Structures are given as C-alpha cells and as structure tokens.
Image (tube, helix red, strand yellow):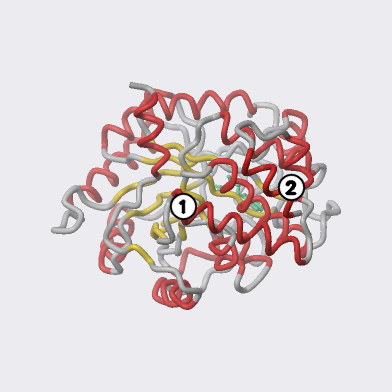
Amino acid sequence: MHHLIEQLQACQDPDVGLLTELLAARGDDCELLRAAAHECMRQYVGEAVYFRGLVEVTNICSQNCYYCGIRKDATVVRYRLSEDEILLAARECMRLGFGSMVLQSGEISSDAYVDFICRVVARIKSETRSDVLTDGLGITLSIGVLSRAQYQRLFDAGAHRYLLRIETSNEKLFRTLHPEEQSLAGRYEAIHDLQSVGFQTGTGVMIGVPGQSMHMMAADILTFRRLDIDMVGMGPYLPSQNTPMAGVPILSADERYQLGLNMIALTRLVCQDINIASTTALEGLHPSGRLEGLRYGANVAMPNLSPVEYRPNYRLYDDKPTTQSAQDAVAAIEQIGRKVALNTLGDPRHYYARRQRHT
Ligand code: SAH
C-alpha cells in the first residue's frame, strides 16, 4: 500500500488502475491512506474546517431520480420555507459564526422559483453584513440543473458557489439511476455553464450504488480533476423505502462506509487544493462518520440549520440524521484536534488558481 501511495504522489497524471487498487484499501492500509490524505490537505488547504449552515429550502421536486426519497412521485409531506424562515436561519448562521450557508432544495426550474431564490439571496447578502463579513454570508446553492440564464441571475443576485453532483461519471450507470429526461451530458453542460458564469463550482457522486464498480469510482475522481472542479461533496448511497430502488441488493454498510472514506482520501490526493465536504450520508452509516470524513482529508462541514420541524420531510434516504445541533458539531470537531474557522468565507483555493490559469 505504501508503495502504491508513493506512486500516486509521484505521478502528474494518475491512471484509473492505480486509483482502483488504492480504493480497495482495507484494515491497516486505510490508516496509511488516511495519513497521506491528511498530510496533503495540511499542505494544500491547511487544517481548518470551514462551516456552511445548510438550509433545506423545499422538498418539492420535478425530477424522479430512482434513488432519491424526495423524488416527484415519492409520498412525503411537501413543504417550502418562507423568505422569513430562511432569513431567520441565515441570522442563526451568522450568530454561530459560520461564514457561509448552503441553500439546497429539490429541482424546480420555473422562473418564479429562481426569482424567489434570487430575492432570498439578495436579502441574505444585505441583512448579514458585519465587521467580519463586510459582504454578508457566503452563499452556496444546490438546487439542480437550470439554464445558463437562470444561473447568471442567481450569480448576479449574490450567490457565489454552486454544487451540482454528477452522481456518477459512468454513462451506463447514470442511465440506470435516472429517467430518460436527464442525462450525464446535461450535468456536464450545467457545470460548464456554472463555471463560465463565475461560480465556484462543486460536484460529487454517490458511493456504493447498485451496479457501480470500484473502477467506476476511480474514474469519478479523475473526472473531478478533468472538470477542474473547486469543491466536492460526496457520500455513500443509502437506500430509501420511498423509491423504486428500495430493496435492490447493495454492498454492506461497512463496505460503503470505508469506500466513502477512501474516496475522500483519494480525491484529496488527486485534486489537492479543492474544498471537500464531509457529508451527512457518512453519518447515516456511522455515528462519527462526518468526523471520520474530516480525518480522511475533508475540510468542510455542513451542519443543518433547517427549521427542526421540517427536517424529517427532507428525507433523501432512510435514517437521515436530523438531530445534531450546530454547537455540538463544532465541539466534536475541536475534539479531534481540528480548528473550526469561524467568521470567514472559506473559499476553495483551487478557485483562485483556476481563475489565474484562465486569465
Ligand atoms: N435537487 C438538488 C439537490 C438535492 S439532492 C440537485 O439535484 O442537485 C442532493 C444530493 O443528495 C443528490 O445530488 C444525491 O447525490 C444525494 N442523494 C439523493 N438520494 C440519496 C440517497 N438515497 N443516498 C445517498 N445520497 C442521496
């Protein structure tokens, strides 16, 4: 394993075979991978953990992704937060010292919804200005595939980061996870649009979905690099009873958990100066999953700031953790020896390097 890690560190252009072998690390070998990723993180982005307060704006969705518990056809009580409810969460985010927030929702591509988000973004920017954040909170959006013109409007309103997962870089696998009207090419195009509009752009995949091989996951990591992505958020697949994929056989929880951690470590080693989030889905498989993600090279945590009464309805998968308070999240991170960087935006370094390369 040691030898393989050195090989990865030495090469400019790692191949998919090498990454596939490294992904298979189990037992003591995982610690070697973890330590290498941690060192790489320390070197390229430092040890600070940046917080984004996550607000789940609505679970209304026009799409029917086969894995997702809030898909259009799922039976779930639908809600949409009001402007004031979101602003309340933004002020809480500020009070806690988290420099940024993420607004996530189901996919609604109407101009009316985009207008609503634009209004909310503009209000957050103007109402959360302070001595430490003169421009207000940083805002990441995660609201799906939209047109370039809509992305432009959201950017102009003041959002500056966007997360859009490709879910998998494998065309065939993508097809088994989504209905006809969605395509991997469409996601790539959206990512390109986001980058050209000027967003700090993130993507990610699900790990351990039925039909996904380690070779495909290794290819996902190379795809993050090829796309010149600034941020990655990814996590293990967790089944949802509310979906057509419920009951399809999957890898064991332990397997998906370790693969999730190894994917973070290898993404850090390959993409180096990007921001990587340690996601809720890891916690779905292990009580300290999100902390482990940070130990494996992630540097972003996204505590949930959605109003508590709505959280059970934003149920992407079964057993989604909904309870940890933001204060507890900070304390837990400090306990593993990492500092939480408060009152700062925490922009990914890769974004500045990318911009410099393109000017
Ligand atoms: N609708 C938005 C964001 C909401 S879903 C969008 O499409 O971008 C956010 C992410 O949750 C998805 O990209 C998917 O990767 C993840 N997700 C959905 N269902 C999941 C499941 N069953 N297990 C693990 N992750 C899931």
In the rendered image, which residue does mark 1 sit on? Answer: 43
Residue drawn 80% across and 46% down?
210
Q: Amino acid at mark 1?
A: Gln
Q: Residues within 10 Å of mark 1 (few under 14, many from 20)?
A: few
Asked if residue 174 is positioned above or below residue 237 in the image, the reply reads: above
Q: Residues within 10 Å of mark 2 (few under 14, many from 20)?
A: some
Asked if residue 285 is positioned above or below residue 105 in the image, the reply reads: below
The percent position of residue 217, horizontal first and vertical second, equals 72, 42
Residue drawn 13% across and 58% down?
131
Residue drawn 35% across and 36% down?
352
Farthest residue in the right direction? Answer: 249
Viewer-closest of 90 and 51: 51
Residue drawn 53% across and 62% down?
294
The percent position of residue 77, horizontal first and vertical second, equals 55, 58
> In this image, 123 relative to 32: left or right?
left
> In this image, 59 relative to 248: left or right?
left
In the rendered image, which residue does mark 2 sit on? Answer: 4
Question: In 3D space, how far apart are the residues under numbered discs 2 and 1 (Cα atoms)?
Answer: 20 Å
Q: Specify the quadrant that holds the C terminus.
A: top left
